[in-house]
Image: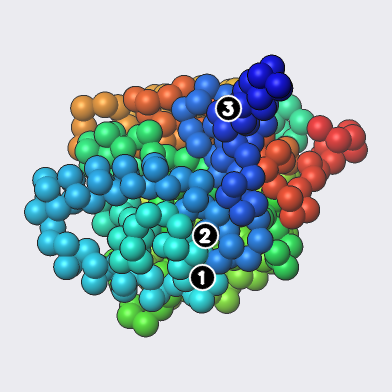
Amino acid sequence: MRIGFFILILGIILTACSSKDNEPSGDLYEGGKLFRSHTGAFYIAELHGTFHQMGRQYGLLLKQQIGTFYQEAINDYMIGERGVKYDDLVQSGRDYYNNFSPTLRDYLDGMAETNGLDADKTYILSEAISVIGFLGCSSLSAWGDYTPDGQTVTGRNLDLPFASLRKFSKYLHVVVWNPTDYPASVASIDYIGGLFYQTAINSKGVFLELQNGENSDTAHPTGRENANNILLESLFRNTTAAEVDKWFHTNLPDCGLIMNASFPGHATIYEWATFRVAVRHADGLISATNDFFDPSWYGYPIPFFDSVNEGIGYTWTRRKNLMRLGEQYHGDITPEKMMMIIDQTLPLDGATFPEGGLIKTIYSVVVRPSELKIWFKVREYSGWEEIDLKTYFSNGAEPVFNLRSGSRP
């Protein structure tokens, strides 16, 4: 009897403490599952069902971390250090919530039911990163003759002008939504409790990452839905390059943005102004930073940047450095090589901001859409962590055929 009781208790303990390297953390979370990356640096939340159900699962899975992050980011930093009034945060959070579609409002409502915060605090935390700061970013994509097998490899930096974000590095994570009645699952990198899209990939191998384009387009038209929100929702529905292209030609953002859309066999840059979109194609290597420079912009009232007129955040130099490194490794750009490229810093070699300056590279991502794999690195916090998203996707996740041999990668 005592031996049986001991085995039962031991089984319960092992289930509660397990990680992705073995089993998920049990099924006390209405179908949601919580994992850790291989070294334990990042959480990975896997959600299933309606958006309201997935919100509830998320709140249950990360209740403790959400509470701690709220205390540190909102109470201690935003209110305590920066002197922001709580009432102002409440109004901003409500405005942010109301700008979502009913689908994503359902998700936040579900989260608020289970995460230990009330609705207002849930809304405040969901936009915390957008309140703290938003500025830069860089990307480089290679495919065709630039990669050994012809398949796309993309590297991306998220750059923000606040050193204070370093203290919140441990709250970056990956959330994976597997919604019912949608053709694609989506994985997004965000802060815990956040709903502020910047970097995401769906289960059909469509990777979208966002870069600020306000060097070139400073307009902020009213009455439009937040571009971050509609971009995130588009990934649940757009499963091909043609669908993505049509979407960008039929939607306009609420501020100037530059989008890298990477697919298994190519990448396209959308210079997405508040009044039109310019599309940049290439023959195997393409980069974007924080300015529009497609030739079709000539004749429009926007500034252009070069070595003399850099713009905010060395936008011209970062793009030049990335393209130079891409050409240097022509034919040999694997995910490992892209990580090496992305690790190169300004001003002479690469595009990543070095420590000590105003602007910080917060995190870097390398993605291989054909295999649904990402490599994720948070600067000054972790090394490169490989995450195989096929493990977490349930809506149509399959690796594509090798573009040259016809075999599966």
Q: Which amino acid, mark 3?
A: Ile
Is residue 327 depicted above or below 101 in this figure? above
Residue 62: % across, % down: 46, 45
Q: Which amino acid, mark 2?
A: Gly
Residue under label 3: 13
Q: CA distance from mark 3 to mark 2?
A: 26 Å
Residue 204: % across, % down: 72, 52
Give SS at disc 2. Answer: helix
User: Which residue lies at the image location 12% right of the left edge and 48% below the top edge?
Assistant: 80
Give SS at disc 3. Answer: helix
Sequence-wise first label, 3 or 1? 3
Give SS at disc 1. Answer: helix
User: Which residue lies at the image location 78% right of the left edge and 53% below the top edge?
Assistant: 396
Q: Residues within 10 Å of mark 1 (few under 14, many from 20)?
A: some
Q: Which amino acid, mark 1?
A: Asp
Residue 259 seen anywhere in this rendered image of the structure: yes
* Residue 23 circle label: none
Q: Mark 3, mark 1: which one is toward the viewer?
A: 3
Residue under label 1: 106
Residue 272 seen anywhere in this rendered image of the structure: no
User: Which residue lies at the image location 41% right of the left edge and 36% below the top edge?
Assistant: 363
* Residue 55 circle label: 2
Q: Residues within 10 Å of mark 3 (few under 14, many from 20)?
A: few
